[in-house]
Image: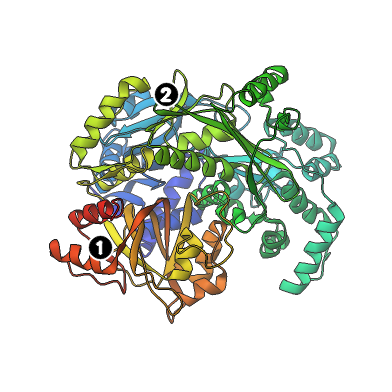
Amino acid sequence: MRVTTVGAGDGALLTAVISLGNRNRKTLGFLPRAAFHQAAETGTLLAATEGTRLVGYALYGLPADRVRLAHLCVENEYRGQGVNQLLVNAISSRHADRLGILLKCRKDYGLEKMWTRLGFEPRTEVDGRGGTREPLVVWWRSHGHPDLFTDLEPTALVTAAMDCNVFADLHSSYQRTGSDETKALSAEWLTGLLELVVLPQLVDEIHAIDHAAERRTQLNALSLYWRPVLEEANHDQWVRALIEAAWEDLGLHLPRADNDLGDLAYVVQARAAGVRHLVTRDAGLLELSPVTEKICGVRILRPADSVVAIDELRRAQVYQPGSVLGTSLTTTAVPAGQEQEQLVFLNKPGGEKQNAFKARLRDFAARPDQWNRQQIVDGNGRLLATYCHGIHGDELHVPLLRVDEQHPLGATLARQLLFLLRQRCRTAGVEILRLTDPHPQRTLRAAAQEDAFQQTGTGLTALVLDRIADTAAIDAHAAALAPRLGLDLPRLQAPLPAAAASAIEHAWWPVKIADAELPTFLVPIRPKWAYELFGIPAGILSRDDRLGLSREHVYYRSPRSRGETAPARILWYASTDKTHSLSAVIGCSRLDQCVSDSGNQLYRQFKHLGVYRRSDIMESCDAHGQAMALRFSDTSLFPYAVTYKRLVQLGARYGQRINVQSVLKISPDLFHSLYEEGHQPR
């Protein structure tokens, strides 16, 4: 018996895997064929075989720094023979640098002994999906690396609205043709990743069902879903804009059928609710996706596409710096006597009382020597965020941090603000950041969890370590701070694998672990994009960076690989052109993802990150229309740029010839020297 990776070209084996999964869908949950094929293309589908016979398989994903196990299945007659252990061990062997393996399993399946035998331990329980909401146990198999935040997957959900067809597929009293694809949306492994919501148009269409018993069945199922609040909007104006764009962009004259106006109502209502995704099997509505995304920012997806691209959709929903750039958002001091206006941030779902909230605001206003109060407003004067911070001893305390959770940019602003607060710590030279808001919003808590904040007695706490050193020195420094934090921090032992090191450097940003097994690539970037992404050199154009450097961005280059892998670090080398002479290393980022694809597909996948137009990406493509996208985050700019001359000198010191015409992998010693050079006054 052996384990092999199922590739896209392994037709017979892939067909056998899909067949085995479909036969066990009652316990596994349905997975569309597209998900199996995508796993085969990405190398995340393993098959256990005996001779030529398939005896089991494991299908998984690789979000962030861990493995997410979606399917683990063995043929009936081979159960109890160690096939599961063989498959799980193979995953760990192939991805030993990842922090571990995460899975969810229904508690009533009674598989505790099996998961424990496979090396998993239960971390928590969450409510399941569907009408019964059977509890799910979250299981974790650690790979033994330092682990700061693996209790749960990211808590920011992909929010998607359903049309009447998808809702009926899930809740109709009879089997509908083609509904198998939709059933994938109720798979247990999607718990905590996907939230389906109900719009008024769906409620209206259910009320219009002629068959009384079927109507009651579907009306009863509505109680399982959240109904978002819709902003006031001119419905007819948005519908007209969609109709005009459909004709101009697609040559479609709407309405083509009686239900077309109802379909457009879903899109307009999703926009008004701040919901970026609409799930449907309606071919006519799917055809309109380019227009609905352009006009209303709503992407229309098939159920299968929603499942296959769940991680991409989640990132696109919560990281939208492209929507912030070029806007009229401004950050200002909170004027005195604005308690009534600030009530839009009252956290009623969190149990906060209006009088107590007002009293806290007045207390902050009465102590301007201790608290810096700021707010973010849009061009119409609408309050989008408010926060209050102050340095106490050698810590930065944030007793108030709120965003407009109903605004489409709420989740993005939350992540931007957390990064700005880290930057404030770095500037002030403090290493402990405490969020002490007694009523933290769900959106902020989710963002803080992703940013490796940990719960302590005073709230949510993070380390901000502005230093570069070897593993032992960083470990000793963190251990010295741990008692003050009230946390049991993981001990770091060299050599730290790439994924573990990258996770620590994210959690304790801007720390750099000099002897970690984390590769560093010197990436050349033209002055135009150095300015657009980082604001360097200053003063080329009027650049809107009122919210500071975005947490996450993307950079495009030719598709020819120079060994780029993720996770890794990027050192940015800003080159020289006809108008600006830079020729210097200007900063460091965390490389999160490398994707090679067509220019059009890359634009679609990463356009939420902004800056680049489709035409800009096409300039980076080769003769076949292919390009490479480098998704990066956690950028820290050097206070002192390292010139080309000095770069060459340091390269020679460590026996490395410098070539700034293309991506260059550099040695750990050279990275260490360049990073220190960029932080030393000269």
Horizontal side, residue 374 vs residue 527: left or right: right
Residue type (three-letter) at the residue carrying disc 1:
Lys
Q: Examine the rendering and report whether any part of residue 590 can be seen.
A: no
- C-alpha separation, residue under disc 2 versus residue under disc 1: 49 Å
Dot 2 alpha-carbon crowd within 10 angstroms: few under 14, some 14 to 19, many 20 or more: few
Residue marked by disc 2? 110
Look at label 2 and name its amino acid: Gly
Where is residue 348? Give x, y as percent: 69, 24
Reading the image, the residue beneath label 1 is 665
Q: Residue drawn 60% across and 51% down? A: 303
Nearest to the observer: residue 541 or residue 343: 541
Using the rendered view, name the quadrant where residue 439 is placed: top right
Which numbered disc flags the more N-terminal residue, 2 or 1? 2
Task: Identify the residue shown where x is 28% and y is 50%.
Answer: 49
Task: Find residue 539 and report its horizontal and vertical position in percent.
Answer: 52, 64
Secondary element at image label 1: strand
Tag 2 and tag 1, C-beta contact below 8 Å? no
